Image (cartoon, rainbow, N blue to C red):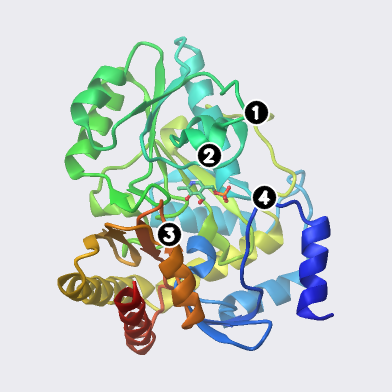
C-alpha cells in the first residue's frame, strides 16, 4: 500500500483524536525512519516509553521468546514472570506489593481506588492534586488532571479532587482537611512543563500524610524507570510514598502499567477489590523484566546522568546565544527548555531537519531521548536544534 492509501484509510477509519504528521515505520536505538526512508534522531521515545531506544535486542528477544511460549493466561492462574517483575519493581523502589494493568491512566485509577478504599473507614475520599498535573484521560484521572481544557465537554467532573499550586507548602497544608484521603503528585511534572517537586515540598507532604494518617501517592508514569537518572525520580529526595504508579517505559513499548503500595497497606485492596483482564500477562511481564535487567546490566542510570549533564550543558550554552530561551530545567534525560515564544513551528522545522522533539505546553520544548543515548547522537541533535533556533 502506498503512503497516500494509508493516509486515506487513517482519515476514513481512525477516529480523529490525534493529529499525526509523520508515518514512522522502523526504529533502531535512538533512530527512527519514516515511510519515505527519511532518518530521524528520536528524542521523543514514544513520549518517555522507548527508554532503551527502539527495538532493543534484549526486549525484542524476550518478547519473541515469550510470544512463542505463553502469551496470556488471565490472573486466575499464576504465571512465571509476574512475581519476578513485582519483586524487581519492589527492589528498585520500596518494599511493597504490586498490581499490574496496561497503561498510565489505569495505574492511576488504581491509585485513586486504593486511596478511596484506604480512606473509607474514616470518611476520607478527597485527593489533593497539583496545578500543572497530568494523570491520564479516563474520567477519574482527568478529574485529577489540572488542565481544564482536557475536561471540557466531559462534565460533570468526578467529585473529590482539589488543586493547589505545585511546590506551595502553605497551600498544601491549607488543602488537607478531615475529608482528605491522599495527596497525589508527579515528582517531576512532565506534561505540565518539566517542573521538579522541591525537597521541602515533598518533605512537607510526607509529614502531613503521616500526621493525618493519609496517603502520599506519586505518579512516576513519565519520570520513572530511570529517566531522571535515578530509577524513580522521588529517589533524588529519599522521601518514599505510600503508593506509586508506573507505566510508559516499563515495557519499552510493550503496553504495561503498574502500581505499588507499601507493605503496611497490602490489605487495603484485598481479593476481588480490583482487577484487569490483561494486567500482568506473561508476555508483558517478560518484556518489562528484560527492561529492568537491561537498565541494571548496562548501568543506564549512570549514562542517563552523564548524558543529561551534557544535554543541559549544551542547552545552557544555546541559551546564551538565543535570548528566546527563558529557562533550561529537568533532571537526567527529562529536560525542558522554556521559550519566550510558542514552540510548535520549531518542532515541525526540527522534524524536517531530522530531529524529533516534543512540547510540554505551548512554550516548552521537551527532550526525552533514550537512556542509552550516545554523545555522538546528542551532539548531532544539538547541532540540528541550534540551526532550528537560529531560524526562529
Ligand atoms: N501520568 C503521567 C505523569 C503521564 O505523563 C501520563 C501520560 O502522558 C499518564 C499518567 C497517562 O498515561 P497513559 O497515556 O499510558 O494512560
Q: Residues within 10 Å of mark 4 (few under 14, many from 20)?
A: few
Q: CA distance from mark 4 to mark 3?
A: 18 Å
Q: Nearer the viewer, mark 1 or mark 3?
A: 3
Which mark is first along the chain, 4 or 2?
4
- Residue 25 image offset from top left, x and y in percent: 67, 79
Residue wearing tag 2: 108
**Tags 2 and 3 in contact by the CB under 8 Å rule?**
no
| Cα–Cα gap, marks 2 and 3 | 23 Å
Ligand 1 neighbours mark 2 (CB distance < 8 Å): yes
Tell me where residue 46 appears, x and y as whole percent: 54, 65
Q: Residue at x 15, y 72 (%)?
A: 320
Inter-mark Cα distance, 1 to 3: 38 Å
Please tell me how crowded label 2 is: few (under 14), some (14-19), or many (20+) other residues with Cα within 10 Å.
many
Q: Which residue is mark 1?
A: 273
Mark in the foreground, 1 or 2:
2
Q: Which mark is residue 363?
A: none
The residue shown at (68%, 72%) is: 63
- For mark 3, does the 10 Å Cα neighbourhood hold few (<14), some (14 to 19), or many (20 or more) residues? many
Q: Identify the element where label 1 is drawn.
A: loop
Choose the circle earlier in sequence order: 4 or 1: 4
Asked whether, in this view, residue 206 is left or right of residue 23, the answer is: left
The answer to whether one can see residue 71 in this image is no
Per the image, label 3 sits on a secondary structure element best described as strand
Q: CA distance from mark 4 to mark 1?
A: 32 Å
Residue under pointer 4: 17
Q: Where is residue 342? Give x, y as percent.
A: 37, 57
Q: Residue at (61%, 47%) from the top-left corner?
A: 100
Q: Are marks 1 and 2 in contact (CB under 8 Å)?
A: no
- The residue labelled by disc 3 is 359
Amino acid at each position: 500500500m502506498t503512503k497516500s492509501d494509508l493516509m486515506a484509510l487513517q482519515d476514513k477509519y481512525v477516529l480523529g483524536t490525534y493529529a499525526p504528521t509523520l508515518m514512522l515505520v522502523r526504529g533502531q536505538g535512538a533512530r527512527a525512519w519514516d515511510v519515505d526512508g527519511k532518518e530521524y534522531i528520536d528524542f521523543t521515545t514514544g513520549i518517555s516509553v522507548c527508554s532503551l531506544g527502539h527495538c532493543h535486542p534484549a526486549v525484542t528477544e524476550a518478547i519473541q521468546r515469550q510470544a512463542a511460549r505463553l502469551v496470556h493466561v488471565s490472573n486466575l492462574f499464576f504465571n512465571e514472570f509476574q512475581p519476578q517483575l513485582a519483586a524487581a519493581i519492589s527492589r528498585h523502589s520500596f518494599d511493597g506489593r504490586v498490581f499490574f494493568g496496561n497503561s498510565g491512566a489505569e495505574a492511576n485509577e488504581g491509585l485513586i481506588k486504593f486511596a478511596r478504599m484506604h480512606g473509607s473507614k474514616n470518611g476520607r475520599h478527597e485527593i489533593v492534586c497539583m496545578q500543572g498535573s497530568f494523570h491520564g484521560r479516563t474520567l477519574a484521572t482527568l478529574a485529577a488532571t489540572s488542565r481544564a481544557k482536557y475536561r471540557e465537554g466531559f462534565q460533570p467532573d468526578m467529585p473529590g479532587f482539589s488543586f493547589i499550586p505545585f511546590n506551595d507548602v502553605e497551600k498544601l497544608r491549607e488543602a488537607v482537611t478531615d475529608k482528605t484521603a491522599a495527596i497525589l503528585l508527579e515528582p517531576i511534572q512532565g506534561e505540565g512543563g518539566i517542573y521538579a517537586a522541591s525537597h521541602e515540598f515533598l518533605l512537607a507532604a510526607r509529614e502531613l500524610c503521616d500526621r493525618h494518617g493519609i496517603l502520599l501517592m506519586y505518579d512516576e508514569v513519565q519520570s520513572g524507570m530511570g529517566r531522571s537518572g535515578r530509577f524513580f525520580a522521588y529517589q533524588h529526595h529519599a522521601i518514599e510514598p505510600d503508593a506509586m504508579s508506573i507505566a510508559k517505559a516499563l515495557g519499552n513499548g510493550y503496553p504495561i502499567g503498574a502500581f505499588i503500595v507499601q507493605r503496611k497497606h497490602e490489605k487495603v485492596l484485598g481479593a476481588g477489590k480490583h482487577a484487569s483482564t490483561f494486567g500482568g500477562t506473561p508476555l508483558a511481564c517478560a518484556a518489562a523484566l528484560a527492561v529492568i535487567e537491561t537498565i541494571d546490566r548496562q548501568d543506564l542510570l549512570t549514562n542517563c546522568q552523564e548524558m543529561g549533564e551534557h544535554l543541559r550543558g549544551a542547552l545552557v550554552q544555546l541559551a546564551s546565544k538565543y535570548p528566546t530561551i527563558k529557562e533550561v530545567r529537568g533532571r537526567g534525560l527529562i529536560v525542558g527548555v522554556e521559550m519566550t515564544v510558542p514552540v510548535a513551528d520549531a518542532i515541525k522545522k526540527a522534524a524536517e531537519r531530522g530531529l524529533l522533539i516534543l512540547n510540554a505546553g505551548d512554550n516548552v520544548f521537551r527532550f526525552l531521548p533514550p537512556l542509552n543515548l550516545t554523545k555522538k547522537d546528542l551532539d548531532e541533535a544539538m547541532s540540528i536544534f541550534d540551526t532550528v533556533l537560529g531560524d526562529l
